[in-house]
Amino acid sequence: MSDSDPLTALEAVIRERLGADPDTSYVAKLHARGRAKIAQKLGEEAVETVIAALGEDRDALTSEAADLVFHLLVLLAEAGLSLDDIRAELARREGVSGLVEKAGRGA
Ligand SMILES: N=c1c2ncn([C@@H]3O[C@H](COP(=O)(O)OP(=O)(O)OP(=O)(O)O)[C@@H](O)[C@H]3O)c2ncn1[C@@H]1O[C@H](COP(=O)(O)O)[C@@H](O)[C@H]1O
């Protein structure tokens, strides 16, 4: 994944801000409030994303999805996980499903 990927860049900023001043950093404020609070925010953003999706408003869905992904990145960082961990898990599943597909085709 390229360094110019916004998700990778945001992930790096979030990791750095976990230890910042909660008065000046939203990420640090969330971190100070703990994992349960971050998980709660993630849940709220998920619900808002679902509502936007049902409203069929592309701009609202884009905005809510960005909030959702941002809060997911904060939760992952707080838990010591990275986007690379998620990429590896998705690649592992792809590998498994690829093998199952091949077996189904008798390959
Ligand atoms: N991408 C984001 C981003 N997306 C959403 N948000 C914040 O997520 C919050 C969600 O809105 P809510 O109304 O649900 O939350 P709230 O009322 O502010 O907070 P609560 O009191 O409800 O917990 C808003 O405060 C948004 O500003 C973000 N805050 C920060 N970033 C980026 O994260 C990086 C680090 O930010 P700081 O930690 O603030 O330096 C920077 O690159 C920022 O641009």
Image (spheres, rainbow, N blue to C red):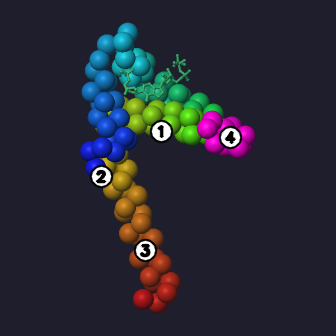
**Amino acid, disc 4:** Asp
Q: Which mark is residue 98?
A: 3
Q: First in sequence, mark 3 or 1: give its number.
A: 1
13 left or right of 102 in image: left
The foreground one among 97 and 2 is: 2
Q: How many residues crowd around disc 4 within 10 Å: few (fewer than 14), some, or many (20 or more)?
A: few
Tags 1 and 4 touching, CB below 8 Å: no
- The residue located at (47%, 38%) in the rendering is 69
Instruction: Determine the secondary structure under disc 2.
Output: loop
Left or right of 47: which side holds 12?
left
Q: Position of residue 11 (x, y in %)?
A: 33, 36
> Would you say the residues marked 1 and 2 are in contact, meaning their CB atoms lie under 8 Å apart?
no
Rounded to the nearest whole Å, what is the CA distance between mark 1 and mark 4? 18 Å
Q: Which residues are magenta?
A: 50-60
- Which residue lies under the disc numbered 1? 69
Q: Helix or strand or loop: what does disc 4 sit on? A: loop
Q: Amino acid at mark 2?
A: Met
Residue placed at 41% from the left, 77% from the top?
A: 99
* Disc 1 crowd, CA 10 A, few/some/many (<14, 14-19, 20+): some
Q: Earlier in the sequence, mark 1 or mark 4?
A: 4
Residue under label 2: 1
Mark 2 or mark 4: whose residue is earlier in sequence = 2
